Every structure is written in C-alpha cells, then in structure tokens.
Amino acid sequence: MREKTRQVMVGSVPIGGGAPITVQSMANTDTRDAAATLAQIGALSEAGCDIVRVAVPDQAAAEALFTLVKKSPVPLVADIHFDYRLALKALEAGIHKLRLNPGNIGDERKVREVVRAAEERRVPIRIGVNSGSVPRHLLERHGRTATAMVESALEHVAIFERLGFYDIVISVKATDIDLTIQAYEELSRRVPYPLHVGITEAGTKWFGTIKSAAGLGALLSRGIGDTLRVSLTADPVEEVKVGWAILSAMDLRRRGPVFISCPTCGRTEIDLEGIAQEVENRLGDFPLPITIAIMGCVVNGPGEGSHADLGICGGKGVGMIFRRGEIVRRVPEEELVDALVAEANRLLEKDRG
C-alpha cells in the first residue's frame, strides 16, 4: 500500500495524494537553444514522460523558458542553484515547478521573494538532497548516513514552513542503493510531502537500468514514491522507457505492452530468442496495455501464459498463436511473428470500435 502524502499540482499533473506515479526526466540540451530543447521535450513526451526538468544556469537560459513553457507539450521544471533571480524569472515565464534548495539561495529575504512568487502562481518547489551535497555540519554530526541526508532535507523544509509554504516535493538520492532506501524510509516517516524517488548517477544504460530497477523497485514495493526519475548516462528517452518498464513490471502503472518470455532450454525447437526480440521490436510501441507471452515449448506454453492477452508457443519448426490460453491457430515458425502482430492489430481494431 502506498504511503499517503499531500498532493501538489505540476501544471495539470498531480503528484502525491494517491495520484498515479509520474515519470520524469531531464533534458540534456543547452536550455538556451530553445529549438533543440523543444525537440527533445517532444521526444520525451512521445515516450511517455509526464514532466521534464531543464537546467537554468544563467539569465539567457531563464529567458528561453518563455518560449519553452509556451510550446512544451508537458509541464516543465526549472532546475535552479544559488541565484534566486533565476527562480523569479522562471516563475515569470510560467514554469510549472522549481527544483531549488532554499538554504543555497542566501538570506531569507531572497527566499521569501521566491516563495511569494511561487505561492501566487501555485507553483510547487522540490527540495533535492544528494548524498554528495550534505552540509559539513551534518556530516560531522551524523557521518555519511541516511540521517544526515534527511536532516539536510528537513533544514530546507523548515525554511519553507517558517514562511508558510507547503507545496513541497522532496528527494533524498544517493548512488548507493541501501543508503537511498534508508533515507527515503526515514524521510517518509517524518514528513507528509510527496517524494520524488530515484538512484542518482546510476550509470550507463545497461548497468544504470539494473541499479535503478533494484533501488526503485525496493522503494515502490514499500509504498514509497509519488514520482520518479531514472538517472542514466544515455539518451533521456531511455530514462523514460526504463521508468515505465519498472512501473509496468510492478503493476503500478501501464503504458503499452508487457512482454513475458521463457529463458529457453533443451526442449526449445524454434529460434525463441530471435522471435522474442522481433516481437518486442515490432510491438514495443503498441498503444494498448496488453500482456504478450513468447514461450518456447508446450511445457511453458498456453498454460503458464494463460494470463497473457496474446502469445506464441513453439513446437518443432512450427508454433501456435494463443489468446488468453486458448489456441487460435498453428503456423510455420517463419510466420509466427507476422501472425502475432496480426492478432494484436485485431485487438486494436476491436478496441477502437
């Protein structure tokens, strides 16, 4: 069961309060290049990204937000560090959310200006603590621990609460999975605010995917997390795909098909590996949230795949197409993928009436 948190609105997208877990990513283009950034935002949106964050390192990037916000198909988050004037300009541009730690801004007068402007526009602010950015005084007191990360986040939270601002989202990320889990577990017990979860600096596409799946899976299975980002050294579109795959695998949110397939063994008499890859390539963007099973033999065939909407069961140079455990037809191996795709398209036609 998911932890109950307060809800904030990021544009038209709700976070927390039982709303669907959202998938986020961050553009890696130069924000000052509005055309390139919009192209990437469009690609992220098409992949299923609910919210996109952009870096705002200077006034030129802040000025570009006027164009980005106006043309973006999804809500945008401005990533701000140190200069409160960038936050004010981002809010003026209509940004939907800020990522900003008030303790890094300077005196309280500057923070109060940002809070007032955010409050007027009903814009939430995410406090983001990474294990490598914990203040020295907390490291000296607690060491490099989950408690140090949580206390750092709570110091920032206290500043906002003192100013009467409560539209807050919090993240406490580390590249170490255990440390991240401990920090989020402690934080979830101490605050009512929605939590943005992720394993920071997870790594390259392959290893980072595994690391993110392990860490996010552990958190989400504990009911912790209202929005997520998978952090990969890769095209940000891959982050979105992995995020959705994690949610789908945990049956928390679905977009497109889920593929299941057996690991093959000595009984397999078709090219199951090649067939499974071709099915995923051809139906990966299929619009319906169906389950597709690719099974190598009768042992793992319609029986174990009976919960699937569609499937393949291999034989010797032939295979069967089945639908919810019922065999539809028998076809030669070389026609299996085409036959499965045809069945999927029939489901799509039926769904569209």
Image: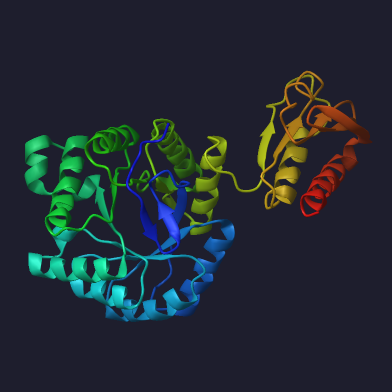
Could you tell me how many numbered marks the image carries?
Answer: 0
Residue 25 vs 66, above or below: the answer is above
User: What is the x, y in percent for residue 24?
Assistant: 44, 55
Which colour style is shown? rainbow
Residue 72 vs 271, above or below: the answer is below
Left or right of 96, for residue 349: right
Q: Quadrant of residue 249?
A: top right
User: What is the x, y in percent for residue 250?
Assistant: 53, 35
- The residue at the point 26 percent across, 67 percent down is 118
Residue 217 vs 93, above or below: the answer is above
Q: Quadrant of residue 112?
A: bottom left
Left or right of 35, for residue 153: left
User: What is the x, y in percent for residue 338?
Assistant: 86, 46
* Front position in the image: 307 or 209: 307
Classify the position of the N terminus by image quarter. Answer: top left
* Front position in the image: 229 or 30: 229
Residue 152 vs 27, above or below: the answer is above
Left or right of 80, for residue 24: right
* Front position in the image: 327 or 94: 94
Left or right of 291, for residue 205: left
Q: Is residue 251 visible?
A: yes
Classify the position of the C terminus by image quarter. Answer: bottom right
User: What is the x, y in percent for residue 128?
Assistant: 27, 52
Q: Is residue 107 visible?
A: no
